[in-house]
Image (tube, rainbow, N blue to C red):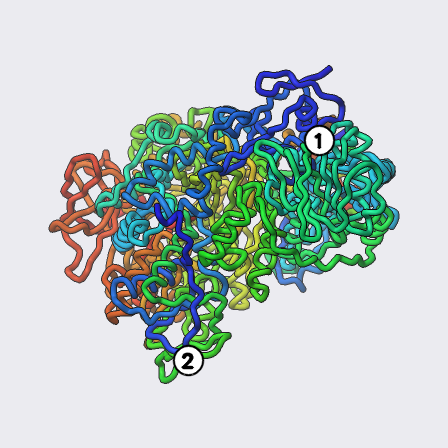
């Protein structure tokens, strides 16, 4: 069984020198993703967008740039016992041993990111190829019992976590 | 009783039959005709290693029938031989072989000129393993990625042992075999053990079994791709164990290619299925296993006429066969099949009548994958027969288990093969020992040259049967040559179909703006622009053009590259990056700028705008967006600048609202002032439009009053709809790329990559004004300074014509070709053809008039101009 | 015909001397052709070709065998047209059948920019006497009926530049034919000789040092590809090249199914079928620089996917062998030929993906330069110092992948 659901996510990108990023924390309203040595994302519910921007700004204390990148990504959440099949069929990078975890790499030919939680995973692809991800998900899961759910806001198992 | 169709006959088959065994049972003996001499070929190896049994199955040529399971309804036919494989007129070529020595085609058909061209079509029709079914549609398959601790290639006893040992140590394993487990083993203790191990393997957690999965390569990584019926499995293990087994050494004696000659294990396999490889056989063996072969043959009812065996084994051969201790097979006689064999022992030769010869005189590891791994610097453990051919059952399993648990294994030193005595060295390409002799004599005296000249080992088996003999041949003549080693093993180890390797890679991939569906809904025709789909037109390009020039229009320009730059060094960074001035950019002003590489050549263009708080907003062409990101980061790193770069290309959409009425439309939707004072030409402002926060930039590309509205992508549709609605009373109509090309051309605005070339400096483009040479430093400055002293040999100029010449038209002046057009369109506003083009100047200066030659038969006389054709003062876009 | 019955040694093993008028480093097509023309056209026979491995082991033996002259600038068009014409009679000139087969070359356009590019190319070629015509989609289909005009349903073919002279040839045979003909005229060819240094004194080259001792030379030519940077370093010269791998593969041999040579400017692949029946498929250079000739899986997968988009029948064909060669890419995608700062040391390099079809013209021109000291006008535009003089010869759009 595989459940797929487009997810509304707020993405706040913080760009700064590595030493300045340590203070950037989402608090209970989101999750912190280490995208690159000089880039951290605070990710949470869409309706918490402004709060995440505020948390980012206060964490950076003026020593970086905070940018709302929410609209740049299309996010799908996969859950159910077959969720890892999606990765095994679309992504070359290995599945991490423990959750929460962030893996970045190509997903069906486009730059992607996967946030793993213990019961589900969230796939991020650039917004201009969101339609492509949906088509590919349909194409590779024909042999599984798939439930396509309507868009819903993001929820994290472990808010405040970092990966 | 199930059956398949073979050349019009219904062939019954039993469970477990391959197509080949079913055909053999139905008394088919000639399985194919050889490539060059059309010699009859019969089953030989039984394990998919030789070319003899290849037929066309269900329209697919070159299918190895001995490893393809028989299935009901298959259509099988032999596609070599004319008129048929059984009666092939071209078999007469063997008698003409004196005229067809190795490389004969290089040495003949040279004169008269054109002779080869006349003959080539016939040669092409003679060549080839079979026809291609051009109507068969590709099958789409997908991929699976695997990341086990261990990948085991080959599920024989050694491979299965390796998998079990690794799993017992808690490791994850993927094990594959190109066939069903055990199907290449004759019945007996080895097969029983394999079957028993297979049960444990299938039930072990942590072991994935890919049966009928062909691992065709060991690539850097390591990456082992496995082709299976359900998908292409890409296995990326930490370790690899190669357990691909060994095959009998291909015999080297005259007549070694006749139907009826069998490799030992192939014959044993047949016998264990109750099929007799011969009625009366001569057998040559060199090891214990050979005794088992003899027993199996006899149990199947084959009469053993003679056996050549080493002295140590000779004494253990029972039955009525003549035993030749220390003997070897020297030759096999027969025309279309085996009729006799000659055994040589102690200098004397004995001819024995028979209808089959079984050869088990040496084992050759299937080393292709191991050699690929070596070439890719991937360390693999090679176990079982593949590492040390001839191991006992227990030794092979122990070998596998040792490797599986991570212990070291020993690989045999490869034995040094002898030079082949006689016969066909290469069955695939019909290369005999005399052919190699001749090639060597002609001067092709290394393994590689010999291979390329004679084509030995370049056929379907890719050296599986013959590379050993090739090695032996070269070693005997040039032992010190480095190139007497085995030739490089290249993927694939087994021939795989294009659709197999393309599995999971054939999807269409287009980048779309948020307005994609809107464009389709209103009749937009989409075209490719790099990786994006953009609107080419909505129906009538002249209408779209007029909307822009006379009223108001919108265009989706969301594909533009967009970057936010901030940080303590942002200004210094941009000053260094761009040839224009940045430091003096007032808040909320922008500038058109070029992007130069270190050679001073233009590779992109765009806008740099100041947001006033130390942040800058940069735009680039749609095509350049990806390249630009690394460009920005590389220079920031190089200069050690403290800057923050945010790529907003996908995050923001952009719509260009343009035309004489653009301001009216905008002010109706805007939550703030949008007059010329609030947003002057070259200005940018944050304005709410239809309730959507936009960065509004005054731009000039199309030559009319234009407002580029940069906004969050999620609001593109709402903004577009609002603009169209508000613009309705003004006659708004959207425009696409085709209209854009004309609009910008009337302004003589360049498109980088179309009007520019590799070495276009700003000066050659007439864009000196965009470069501030008095800046102490910017990328490309040194080169431009040096080139200021060099006269350019061509310049980009505007041209006017009475009609528009075709794109790419050549320009001629005074009888000389002096250039060509890069862009050309008819301008409705000016009633002229307008164009941009490169005009060469070899010192005499740029001509004032030229003629355009565009293949239409028209000769169009044009004048060379400077600056925009339409609204040269730029009054309209500065409104 | 009589050749078929004679048992002759065509490639001799020569004994290495210690002094020659011309030493050529690199036994590929360019070096061997230069050696041949030195002897055949200019009477210079005291020539030695030094090859590190076996003749033709580099690019000459790895390319995709296409001969064409449909370039973009007047300079390269003239050069490749000359080379094409030499290739047309090469079999008779060298008395060796290189299996040249004229098939016609289609260069497909799937987008507006490429449509424009191909139209321009056709007009440019015609202007300079090269036979290339622009075809619309219907004409393309008529010229090559096997094509899927929808581009696999993804990138429809909109038109093409069609170059009827496009031909294929047996690449190894070109090296062998030049080698044999050169040896017949007295030129020496030495395989297994590695040049380890150049003997340069006072800015003048006097010879080479090898793994078998020093060799004095009046002039030295480097006709090396792939590792030419090593040689250039020996001379203290920096060459404006970067080296990229280029991969290709063949299928098994099938009955004739494709006559044309087909290249796609948007899909960046090309396909042709040899006389033996093997279908040869390749794509663009790998995006990274490397001296490795390893074959990769991503190339095989990506190239095959695109090939099937053009020719659906390719899906069922079986891949036999993939390989990789090295391409020395120049900034403007045109070659480097001629003199450099070191006297008596010449270079023929930067052959990128445009080297094989240039062999005869490059050999003849370099031979002329070596023999007479004058730079032939045909190759003057390809001088090494052209970048410094802002006289690049931009050919990126036409270099394609082959």
Label 1 sits on residue:
B278
Could you tell whether B452 is left or right of B333 in the image?
Answer: left
User: Can you give x and y, in whole percent of width and height, for residue B124 in the image?
Assistant: 42, 35
Label 2–label 1 contact, CB within 8 A: no
Q: Secondary structure at mark 2?
A: strand
Q: Which residue sits furthest left?
A: B814
Q: B669 or C23, which is in the foreground?
A: C23
Q: Residue at x 48, y 27 (%)?
A: B82
Q: Chain of mark 2?
A: C
In which quarter of the view is residue B822 placed?
A: top left
The reply to whether residue B830 is in sight is no
Q: Left of A64 or right of it: where is B784? A: left
> Which residue is pictured at 50% across the width and 40% down the height?
B653
In front: A123, or B353? B353
Q: Of the numbered discs in the image, which one, if any, rests on residue C338?
A: none
Residue C167 visible in rendering: yes
Q: Residues within 10 Å of mark 2 (few under 14, many from 20)?
A: some
Chain ID, mark 1:
B
Q: Tell me the residue at 54%/64% (across/down).
A: B637
């Amino acid at each position: 069984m595989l459940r797929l659901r487009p997810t509304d996510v707020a993405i706040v990108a913080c760009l700064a020198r590595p030493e300045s990023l340590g203070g950037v924390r989402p608090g209970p309203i989101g999750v912190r993703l280490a995208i690159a040595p000089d880039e951290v994302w605070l990710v949470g519910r869409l309706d918490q967008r402004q709060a995440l921007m505020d948390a980012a700004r206060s964490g950076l204390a003026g020593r970086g740039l905070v940018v709302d990148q929410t609209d740049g990504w299309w996010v799908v959440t996969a859950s159910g016992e077959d969720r890892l099949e999606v990765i095994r069929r679309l992504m070359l990078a290995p599945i991490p041993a423990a959750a929460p975890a962030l893996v970045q790499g190509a997903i069906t030919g486009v730059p992607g990111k996967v946030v793993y939680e213990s019961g589900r995973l969230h796939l991020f692809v650039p917004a201009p190829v969101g339609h492509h991800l949906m088509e590919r998900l349909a194409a590779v899961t024909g042999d599984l019992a798939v439930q396509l759910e309507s868009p819903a806001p993001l929820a994290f198992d472990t808010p405040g976590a970092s990966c | 009783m199930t059956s398949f169709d073979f050349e019009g006959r219904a062939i019954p088959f039993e469970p477990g039959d391959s197509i080949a065994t079913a055909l053999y049972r139905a008394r088919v003996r000639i399985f194919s005709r050889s490539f060059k001499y059309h010699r009859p070929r019969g089953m030989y190896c039984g394990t998919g290693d030789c070319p003899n049994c290849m037929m066309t199955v269900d329209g697919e040529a070159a299918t190895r029938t001995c490893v393809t399971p028989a299935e009901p309804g298959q259509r099988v036919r032999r596609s070599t031989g004319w008129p048929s494989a059984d009666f092939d007129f071209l078999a007469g070529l063997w008698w003409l072989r004196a005229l067809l020595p190795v490389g004969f085609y290089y040495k003949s058909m040279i004169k008269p000129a054109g002779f080869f061209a006349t003959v080539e079509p016939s040669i092409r029709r003679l060549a080839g393993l079979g026809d291609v079914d051009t109507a068969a549609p590709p099958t789409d398959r997908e991929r699976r990625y695997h990341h086990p601790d261990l990948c085991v290639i080959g599920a024989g006893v050694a491979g299965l042992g390796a998998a079990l040992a690794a799993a017992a140590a808690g490791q994850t394993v993927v094990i594959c075999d190109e066939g069903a487990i055990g199907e290449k083993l004759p019945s007996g203790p080895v097969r029983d053990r394999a079957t028993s191990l297979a049960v444990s393997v299938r039930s072990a957690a942590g072991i994935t079994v890919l049966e009928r999965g062909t691992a065709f390569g060991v690539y850097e990584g390591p990456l082992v791709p496995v082709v299976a019926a359900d998908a292409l499995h890409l296995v990326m293990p930490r370790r690899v164990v190669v357990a691909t087994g060994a095959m009998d050494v291909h015999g080297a004696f005259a007549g070694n290619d006749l139907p009826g000659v069998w490799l030992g294990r192939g014959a044993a396999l047949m016998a264990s299925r109750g099929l007799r490889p011969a009625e009366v056989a001569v057998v040559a063996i060199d090891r214990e296993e050979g005794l088992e072969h003899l027993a199996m043959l006899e149990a199947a009812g084959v009469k053993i006429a003679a056996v050549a065996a080493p002295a140590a084994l000779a004494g253990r051969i029972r039955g009525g066969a003549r035993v030749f201790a220390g003997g070897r097979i020297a030759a096999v006689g027969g025309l279309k099949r085996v009729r006799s064999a000659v055994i040589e022992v102690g200098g004397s030769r004995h001819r024995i009548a028979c209808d089959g010869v079984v050869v088990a005189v040496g084992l050759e590891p299937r080393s292709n994958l191991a050699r690929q791994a070596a070439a890719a610097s991937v360390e693999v453990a090679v176990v079982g027969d593949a590492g040390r051919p001839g191991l006992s059952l227990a030794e092979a399993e122990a070998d596998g288990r040792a490797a599986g648990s991570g212990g070291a294994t020993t690989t045999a030193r490869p034995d040094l093969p002898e030079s082949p005595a006689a016969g066909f060295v290469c069955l695939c390409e019909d290369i005999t020992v005399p052919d190699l002799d001749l090639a060597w004599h002609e001067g092709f005296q290394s393994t590689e040259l010999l291979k390329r000249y004679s084509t030995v080992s370049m056929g379907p088996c890719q050296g599986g049967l013959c590379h050993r003999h090739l090695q032996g041949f070269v070693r005997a003549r040039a032992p010190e040559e480095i190139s007497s080693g085995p030739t490089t093993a290249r993927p694939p180890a087994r021939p795989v179909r294009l659709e197999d390797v393309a599995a999971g890679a054939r999807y269409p991939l287009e980048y779309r703006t948020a307005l994609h569906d809107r464009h389709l809904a209103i009749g937009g025709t989409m075209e490719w622009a790099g990786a994006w789909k953009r609107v080419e037109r909505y129906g009538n390009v002249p209408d779209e053009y007029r909307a822009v020039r006379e009223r108001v229009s919108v265009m989706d320009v969301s594909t533009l590259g967009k970057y936010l730059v901030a940080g303590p060094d942002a200004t210094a960074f941009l000053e260094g990056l761009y040839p224009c001035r940045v430091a003096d950019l007032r808040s909320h002003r922008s500038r058109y700028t070029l992007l130069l590489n270190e050679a001073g050549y233009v590779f992109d263009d765009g806008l740099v705008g100041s947001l006033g708080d130390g942040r800058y907003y940069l735009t680039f062409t749609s095509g350049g967006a990806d390249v630009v990101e690394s460009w920005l980061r590389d220079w920031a790193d190089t200069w050690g600048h403290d800057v923050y770069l945010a790529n907003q290309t996908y995050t923001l959409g952009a719509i260009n609202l343009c035309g004489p009425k653009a301001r009216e439309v905008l002010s109706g939707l805007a939550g703030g002032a949008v007059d010329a004072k609030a947003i002057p030409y070259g200005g940018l402002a944050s304005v709410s439009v239809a309730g959507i926060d936009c960065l509004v930039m005054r731009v000039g590309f199309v030559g009319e009053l234009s407002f580029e509205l940069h906004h969050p992508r999620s609001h593109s549709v709402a903004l577009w709809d609002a603009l169209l609605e508000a613009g309705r009373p003004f006659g708004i109509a959207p425009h696409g790329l085709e209209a854009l090309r004309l609009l910008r051309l009337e302004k003589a605005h360049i498109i980088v990559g179309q009007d520019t070339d590799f070495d276009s400096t700003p000066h050659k483009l007439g864009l000196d004004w965009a470069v501030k040479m008095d800046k102490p430093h910017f990328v490309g400055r040194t080169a431009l300074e040096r080139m200021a002293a060099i006269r350019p040999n061509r310049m980009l100029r505007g041209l006017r014509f009475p009609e528009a010449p075709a794109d790419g038209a050549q320009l001629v002046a005074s009888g000389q070709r002096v250039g060509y057009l890069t862009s050309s369109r008819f301008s409705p506003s000016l009633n002229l053809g307008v164009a941009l083009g490169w005009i060469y100047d070899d010192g005499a200066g740029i001509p004032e008039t030229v003629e355009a030659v565009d293949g239409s038969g028209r000769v169009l006389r044009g004048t060379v101009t400077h600056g925009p054709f339409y609204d040269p003062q730029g009054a309209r876009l500065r409104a | 015909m009589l050749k078929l019955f004679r048992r002759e040694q065509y490639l001799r093993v020569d004994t290495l001397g210690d002094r020659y008028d011309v030493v050529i480093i690199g036994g590929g097509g360019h070096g061997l052709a230069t050696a041949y023309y030195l002897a055949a056209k200019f009477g210079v026979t005291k020539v030695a070709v030094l090859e590190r491995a076996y003749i033709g082991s580099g690019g000459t033996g790895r390319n995709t065998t296409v001969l064409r002259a449909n370039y973009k600038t007047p300079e390269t068009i003239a050069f490749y047209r000359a080379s094409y014409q030499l290739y047309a009679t090469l079999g008779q000139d060298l008395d060796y059948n290189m299996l040249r087969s004229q098939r016609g070359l289609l260069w497909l356009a799937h987008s507006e920019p490429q449509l424009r590019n191909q139209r321009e190319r056709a007009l440019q070629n015609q202007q300079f006497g090269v036979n290339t015509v622009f075809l619309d989609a219907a004409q393309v289909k008529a010229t090559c009926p096997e094509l899927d005009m929808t581009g696999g349903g993804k990138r429809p073919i909109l038109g093409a530049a069609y170059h009827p002279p496009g031909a294929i040839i047996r690449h190894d045979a070109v090296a062998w034919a030049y080698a044999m003909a050169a040896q017949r005229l007295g030129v020496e060819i030495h395989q297994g000789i590695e040049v380890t240094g150049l003997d340069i004194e006072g800015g003048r080259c006097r010879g080479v040092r090898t793994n078998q001792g020093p060799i004095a030379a009046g002039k030295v030519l480097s006709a090396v590809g792939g590792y030419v940077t090593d040689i250039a370093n020996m001379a203290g010269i920096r060459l404006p090249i970067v080296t990229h791998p280029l991969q290709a593969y063949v299928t098994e041999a099938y009955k004739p199914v494709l006559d044309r040579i087909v290249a796609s400017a948007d899909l960046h692949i090309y396909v042709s079928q040899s006389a033996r029946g093997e279908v040869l498929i390749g794509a663009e250079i790998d995006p990274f620089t490397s001296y490795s000739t390893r074959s990769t899986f991503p190339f095989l997968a990506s190239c095959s996917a695109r090939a099937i988009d053009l020719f659906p029948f390719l899906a069922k064909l079986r891949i036999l062998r993939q390989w990789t060669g090295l391409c020395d890419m120049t900034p403007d995608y045109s070659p480097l030929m001629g003199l450099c700062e070191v006297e008596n040391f010449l270079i023929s390099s930067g052959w990128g993906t445009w080297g094989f079809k240039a062999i005869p013209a490059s050999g003849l021109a370099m031979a002329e330069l070596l023999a007479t000291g004058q730079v032939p006008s045909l190759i003057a535009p390809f001088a090494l110092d052209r970048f410094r003089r802002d006289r690049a010869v931009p050919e990126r759009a036409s270099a394609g992948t082959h």
